[in-house]
Image: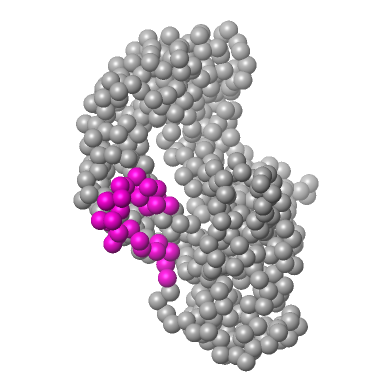
Amino acid sequence: CQVVSGADYGWRSGTGKWPPYYEDSLPPVVNIGPGSPTGVAAGVGAKFPAKYRDALFALDWTFGTIYAIHLEARGAGYVGKSEPFVYGAPLPVTDAIVGDDGALYFTIGGRGTQSALYRVTYDRPLGDEKPAAEPAEVVAARKLRRELEAFHGKENPAAVDRAWPHLASPDRFLRHAARVAVESQPVGQWAGRVFAADDPQTRVTGAVALARRGNPAEHREKLTAALLELDPATLDESQLLGYLRAWALDFIRLGKPTDAEREEIVAKLDPLLPSKSADANTELVRVLVYLEAPSVIGKTLALIEGRGAPEIPDWTELIERNPGYGGTIRAMLDNYPPSREIGFAFMLRNLRSGWTLGQRRRYFEFLNAAAKHPGGASFGGFLANTRDEALGFCTNEERAALADVTGENFNPVPDFPIHPPKGPGRVWTVDTAGRVANSGKFREASFENGRGLFHAAGCAACHRFAGLGGDIGPDLTSIRNKFDAAYVLESILEPSKNISDQYGSSQVTLKDGNTLTGLVVEREGTLDVYPPDAKAEPSTVKTADVAKVEPVPVSQMPPGLINAMNGDEVRDLLAYLMSAGDPKDKVYGK
């Protein structure tokens, strides 16, 4: 994303992500796909061909890739294309810089992995390449954006007059710069202009600004009236999305409409659902659910059940660079979940009234069907939380009638036999267990036995591997891309030696003096504390009851998990962990 003045792109996790069409946000420069971004460097000064000298280099730790991002000015912003520039497996890249000698230097490491410094050079003669001149209209648009950005964050009597015409700009970067310039001025200088604006785009952009900066007592009723004056059926898709975002911000920032206003807004918006625009459907459902529109349940269930083929991203090349995470993503691509429809179900979960028992049943049956698709580590938990919140608004009679469709486990379960270790076991040490870490012996290892031992030993209670298991600890599918077999054994036998800051245990001290120890997961207003016993239920406490949370230098994972295994079983388990869940992996010599 281009970090222009005043930009806001939402939040990275869960439902905090913003869609790119939000009127108070901006579209991305380029979508790279899944990964763990760790650094960005400009190619300025590199002794590379002009194409790469003018590029940005973006580093992805998970998939071991440095991308060259080739930018193209478009209006007052940029669009880009990504090209894999350097990649390897494993290659956990952490940062990069162009040196004084014109080479690109980058480092790898992190999370206990091997650190190293690399240099990338170009060993052929460089031509006298000069960048192409930018079109005059692009230069002018960028200059105008920067002029408008000069008004950001400070009062200037000239700002509103200068920025106002550009609230109607078809260029989103200019429109954004103009809106933030207006928002930076006293609301009294421009609120009246929003109500008087004849141009639909100006009124929509101005309404977004007023919803963000207005005073509920002074502006809520007037802004609602101004939005009601627009005919959404006459707006193009971009304007309609902005209009719906303005309504959402009006409710979020300035407050609920009156009952009479609510009925009038529903009468405006309800005929638009369903829309030919998938994005408009998403925002219409969002707003109409908030307004408790009488028809929104039936219309949304029809959208869910009438879904077409999903838009499946092309990540084929990417997932080859990390067989661990890649295997999980490949499984998801092969049976892609109905993500937009899950979003509809998420919105419907908080609708308290208006349901028939049949509609409730259709809703929960969809969640059950969605859970049959593979997803990331939190996918099952997300669906379960959605179901549980929806159940919270069901009557006792409804819950009893729906019990047959509301009790499913949304985390995938093994469909293969799991047998306890045969032994005889021993107290394994790093030295004795290390003797089975010879990769040559892995050729004799059993994939099926290793997989079963992973579950029998309790590893899957906390860790996901190849799409199965818990989500309390880190996903181990890609562990072989980060660590060698000896390190993995050491982590199993001495789990407290290297504890990730993401998964360390904590001691939670309550205001009444009681303490809880375990892995802490923050929820909205509560903390879930998972005890070291993976089979035990977590304790949930209110955030308001917590006095302090302190890290504990002891791993959540108990030592001795493999002490019941014999040498062949340790070998089988270790080979399985190094296979990324693939029975044909080279670790088995196949």
Q: Is residue 393 magenta?
A: yes
Give the image location of residue 336, x and y in percent.
Answer: 37, 59
User: Residue sitting at 63 percent across and 77 percent down?
Assistant: 561
Give the image location of residue 415, x and y in percent.
Answer: 40, 76
User: Residue sitting at 28 percent across and 62 percent down?
Assistant: 404
Residue 546 image-quadrant placement: top right
Q: Is residue 85 visible?
A: no
Q: Is residue 461 visible?
A: yes
Q: Residue furthest bottom?
A: 424
Q: In the image, is residue 490 above or below residue 122? A: below
Q: Nearer the viewer, residue 296 or 360?
A: 360
Q: Residue furthest right?
A: 100
Q: Is residue 564 left or right of residue 249?
A: right
Give the image location of residue 406, x and y in percent.
Answer: 33, 58
Q: Is residue 84 magenta?
A: no
Q: Nearer the viewer, residue 557 or 275?
A: 557
Quadrant that contains the N terminus: top right
User: Residue sitting at 56 percent across and 56 percent down?
Assistant: 539
How is the structure coloured here?
one colour
Residue numbers of the magenta segment: 385-413
Residue 199 image-quadrant placement: top left
Residue 330 image-quadrant placement: bottom left
Q: In the image, is residue 259 above or below residue 122? A: above
